[in-house]
């Protein structure tokens, strides 16, 4: 049973960040995974009033606020046009519409779970997370780090021309956690970024000439997996 | 802390612990249609609307919903009334425990997409679990409701024309059918 | 806690229960992960949650028995207590971890099997499954104005629960009232009093209302799932497909407590073997053992499911071995109406439409054209298979149902029963029976289930009994009432009751 002593809705990121430095405090985004841990929270820091929800298409890419829900991603015409529906494919099997109306992209990326459909696709899309203090860093680097107390404010999917994207997952039952996830993003210059998740570890990706990846066949899975190996150079 | 919510159109405030869920809040205010079937946000029984969006009340803090509109089935009787008769006719409702959440989510579906296909219905209601049925009854009921709703529209036309001239020889009817926008009711 | 030693069972069965009396409300000997260790009572859920980590339990860990194959005669004895009781005839021996043993047979099975052209010898294993009804286990208790213990429970068995609580708390049954409101499914899970004893105890002691609501996790780990079984089938037949002998040995894992162990194991044999009327001989033996798993319970099928899975799988393997059509083999060997069923306690199949079922299936899925496989193209195919099953409506000579019907001054009828509608629609069915006999609109029959103070006795809703047994009582009661109304009406109208029926409406 989750317990919370205090509930605060900060009006500024600085305030939210300051509160989050205390170990006993927790950021509240979608709260879906948090409640499963039955935590004892001293102060719940609700990010709802920080204007972090929204998908903005700019010339350099899609700027997605951390409080953007998975359902927002699922129904975004712009994002799905750009990715030929891969974004929808990545989230549409997650539990149900009600949950997706609450789960946030920030939570999905911050938690760095192996089963994350979102992480798998966003890796292949070369996404960059935006952190309050540290600024922008590549998702691929972020995924190798341990969780810290910086606040994830958003994620950027860079646009470097047209892409062809695809997302697939294997699930034992509909709506269940995936047991294997994969995404492929092919760019105009002929490179393919291939990412594999639920390995059962967190998703990992590698980029190479598209034809070379095709020629690899199933071995591509292994190569993606090794890309995620922390011990590898 | 004091939490104020516009519950089924009425401004309701009460003292709530910071960790009180929206589920506990609405039930404390008498909305007993809202049920709980799990503690892992998996089953959909606790579905309520927050600002017309279907969410899991068990997984939302009442404090998060403060200042927002919350609707439960108690406040949506008329809208539910349109199709729940079809559920009953089909025998789709057995123990009834999953029913409120499923009806709520069906209302949400039909608001978002008034003409869903079977695949649309299955995808939208995937987050509503039921252990008594195999979901066929609910699906059949909704599709029958949609079909009947369509037929009612065209039957109204037929009955109007039939009063004047026999159906086959009613040129006016054919003309009206072609020009009337779909879904219109006379 | 002074329990004064006498143990009880939580199983909902007609007494004398064929279940061992092996439970205490709280036992110092805990037998599975999920067995209650302490009752924590607080004003709020939060208060209880805060109390839990303050309790430290010291366990002396004994070697666990987690495999039914090694349970019998295992050095770890799961119920070593001397006050363990079981009615005679069940064949249990607690020091061997044996809850029940049964043997039945007819003819010389060994001789028959050795003279068969082919013997299919297989062992099948079935797993535990959760009923997982959407509403978890929950009950609450209060003391009423007369000082009696009133329990409201999500249950299929109000009368059995009353007796179970009386036995658990060592108080008279007369001091207890059990009610069942609308509940969210059961499927057999609630044919065991999983939760009621705890608030009953707390409220009886503290004289304050108390409640318990099992979480989903608790409903999965401290409940009453289907018995895992190991079924060894020996099926003997001739080349032409005549099945001449069936032998089945079932090993059943009833977990930490006996409950529905002795009864479910029986169905594994008695509801599978009798499907084959052609058999000259049969043998069914069963051992139900204790293990340190969750205590198994009732789940639709109640042992028949496991037995039929095994026997029907063996028959399909036989068909495959003999290159015969599995449907044809069944048509050849099935039990038919009028046959005596040695494996079903020597009863006669007085009502049996199995032949018509098989014929209907053959026709409706184009069996002859499609078996074994229909290619659909695109790398997909539809495979065809068949199995038969049998079920009874209620436990013969054991289940009981009753009904009270009142004609109210308002011109409607109160139908009061002790069965339990759990989504099965039994209240509607029973109302329809009454309405048809009384020749009134369904809306004029108000069905009430179930309250031990108000409802006439009913063994409860399980074993497919309610529509047939309780329904039978409803029909009888409705007919009686109709006669009474007609007689009274005839008196008032000064006419002959015989001619009254025409004027009924």
Image: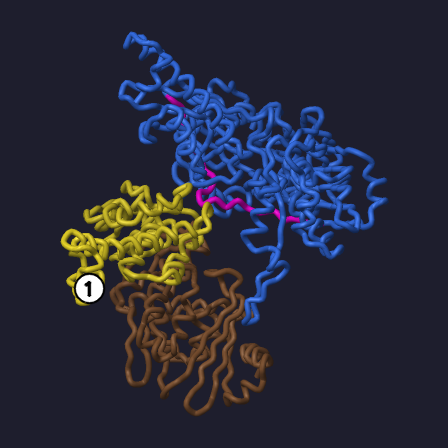
Q: Residues within 10 Å of mark 1 (few under 14, many from 20)?
A: few
Which residue is depicted at the point 71% across and 54% down? C324
Left or right of A176, for residue B34:
left
| Chain of residue at mark 1 | B
Q: Where does the magenta region start and end?
A: C124-144
Residue sitting at x 25%, y 48%: B76
What residue did someone put label 1 on?
A: B174
The tint chain A carries is brown
In x, y percent, where is residue C271?
Answer: 65, 38
Q: Colour of chain B?
A: yellow
Where in the figure is residue C248, as x and y percent of width and height? 74, 42
Colour applied to chain C: blue
Residue C32 in the image: above or below residue A24 = above
Taking depth in this image into account, of C31 and C18 the one nearest to the observer is: C18
Residue C138 forms part of the magenta stretch: yes
Q: Tell whether C107 sits left or right of C133.
A: right
Q: Quadrant of the C terminus of chain A?
A: bottom right
Whole-percent x, y for residue B52 in the image: 26, 57
């Amino acid at each position: 049973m989750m317990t919370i002593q205090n509930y605060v809705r900060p009006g500024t990121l600085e305030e939210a960040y300051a509160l989050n430095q205390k170990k006993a405090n927790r950021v509240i985004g979608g709260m879906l995974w948090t409640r499963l841990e039955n935590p004892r929270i001293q102060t719940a820091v609700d990010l709802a009033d920080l204007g972090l929800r929204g998908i903005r298409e700019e010339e350099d890419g899609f700027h997605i606020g951390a409080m953007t829900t998975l359902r927002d991603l699922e129904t975004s015409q712009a994002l799905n046009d750009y990715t030929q529906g891969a974004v929808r494919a990545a989230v549409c099997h997650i539990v149900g519409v009600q949950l997706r109306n609450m789960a946030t992209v920030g939570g999905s990326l911050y938690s760095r779970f192996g089963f994350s459909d979102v992480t798998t696709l966003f890796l292949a899309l070369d996404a960059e997370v935006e952190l309050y203090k540290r600024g922008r860093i590549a998702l691929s680097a972020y995924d190798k780090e341990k969780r810290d107390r910086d606040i994830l404010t958003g994620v950027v999917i860079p646009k470097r021309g047209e892409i062809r994207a695809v997302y697939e997952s294997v699930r034992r039952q509909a709506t269940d956690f995936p047991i294997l996830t994969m995404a492929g993003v092919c760019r105009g210059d002929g490179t393919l970024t291939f990412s594999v998740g639920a390995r059962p570890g967190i998703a990992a990706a590698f980029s190479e000439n598209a034809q070379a990846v095709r020629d690899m066949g199933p071995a591509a899975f292994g190569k993606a997996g090794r890309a995620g190996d922390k011990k590898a150079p | 802390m004091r939490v104020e919510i516009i519950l089924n159109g009425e401004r309701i405030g009460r003292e709530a612990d910071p960790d009180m869920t929206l589920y506990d809040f609405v039930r404390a205010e008498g909305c007993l249609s809202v049920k709980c079937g799990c503690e892992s946000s998996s089953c959909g029984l606790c579905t309520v609307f927050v600002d017309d969006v279907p969410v899991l009340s068990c997984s939302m803090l009442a404090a998060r919903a403060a200042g927002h509109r919350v609707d439960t089935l108690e406040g949506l009787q008329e809208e539910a009334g349109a199709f729940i008769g079809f559920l009953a006719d089909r025998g789709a409702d057995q123990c009834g425990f999953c029913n409120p959440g499923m009806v709520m989510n069906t209302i949400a579906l039909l608001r978002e997409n008034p003409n869903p296909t079977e695949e649309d219905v299955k995808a939208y209601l995937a987050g509503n679990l039921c252990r008594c049925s195999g979901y066929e009854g609910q699906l059949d009921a909704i599709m029958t409701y949609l079909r009947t709703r369509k037929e009612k529209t065209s039957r109204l036309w037929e009955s109007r024309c039939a009063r004047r001239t026999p159906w086959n020889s009613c040129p006016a009817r054919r003309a009206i059918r072609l020009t009337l926008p779909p879904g219109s009711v006379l | 806690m002074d329990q004064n030693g006498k143990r009880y069972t939580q199983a909902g069965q007609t007494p004398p229960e064929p279940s061992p009396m092996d439970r205490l409300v709280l036992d110092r000997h805990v037998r599975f992960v999920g067995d209650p260790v302490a009752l924590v009572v607080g004003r709020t859920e939060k208060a209880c949650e805060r109390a839990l980590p303050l309790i430290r339990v010291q366990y002396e860990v004994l070697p666990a028995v987690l495999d039914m194959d090694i349970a019998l005669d295992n050095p770890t004895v799961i119920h070593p207590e001397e006050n363990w009781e079981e009615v005679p005839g069940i064949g249990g021996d607690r020091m061997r971890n044996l809850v029940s043993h049964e043997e039945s047979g007819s003819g010389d099975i060994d001789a028959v099997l050795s003279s068969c052209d082919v013997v299919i010898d297989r062992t099948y294993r079935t797993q535990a499954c959760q009923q997982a009804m959407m509403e978890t286990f929950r009950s609450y208790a209060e003391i009423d104005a007369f000082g009696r213990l009133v329990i409201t429970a999500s249950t299929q068995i109000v009368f059995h629960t009353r007796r179970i609580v009386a036995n658990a708390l060592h108080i008279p049954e007369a001091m207890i009232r059990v009610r069942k409101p609308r509940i969210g499914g059961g499927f057999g899970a609630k044919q065991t009093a999983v939760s009621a004893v705890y608030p009953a105890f707390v409220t009886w002691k503290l004289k304050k209302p108390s409640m318990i609501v099992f979480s989903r996790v608790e409903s999965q780990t401290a409940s009453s799932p289907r018995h895992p079984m190991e079924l060894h089938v020996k099926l003997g037949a001739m080349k032409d497909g005549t099945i001449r002998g069936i032998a089945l040995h079932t090993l059943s894992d009833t977990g930490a407590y006996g409950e529905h162990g002795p009864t479910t194991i029986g169905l594994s044999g008695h509801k599978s073997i009798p499907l084959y009327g052609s058999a000259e001989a049969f043998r069914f033996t069963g051992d139900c053992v204790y293990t340190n798993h969750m205590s198994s319970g009732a789940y639709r099928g109640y042992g028949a499911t496991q037995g039929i899975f095994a026997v029907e799988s063996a028959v399909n393997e036989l068909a495959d071995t003999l290159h015969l059509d599995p449907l044809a083999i069944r048509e050849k060997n099935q039990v038919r109406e009028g046959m005596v069923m040695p494996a079903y306690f020597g009863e006669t199949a007085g009502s049996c439409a199995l032949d018509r079922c098989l014929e209907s299936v053959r026709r409706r899925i184009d069996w002859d054209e499609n078996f074994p496989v229909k290619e659909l193209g695109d790398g997909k195919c539809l495979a065809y298979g068949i199995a038969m099953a049998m079920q009874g409506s209620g436990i013969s000579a054991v289940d009981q149902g009753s009904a009270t019907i009142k004609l109210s001054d308002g011109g409607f009828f109160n139908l009061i029963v002790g069965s339990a509608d759990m989504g099965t629609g039994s209240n509607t069915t029973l109302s329809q029976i009454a309405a048809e006999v009384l020749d009134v609109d369904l809306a004029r029959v108000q069905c009430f289930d179930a309250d031990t103070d108000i409802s006439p006795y009913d063994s409860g809703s399980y074993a497919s009994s309610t529509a047939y047994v309780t329904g039978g009582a409803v029909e009888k009661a409705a007919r009686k009432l109709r006669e009474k109304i007609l007689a009274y009406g005839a008196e008032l109208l000064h006419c002959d009751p015989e001619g009254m029926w025409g004027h009924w409406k």
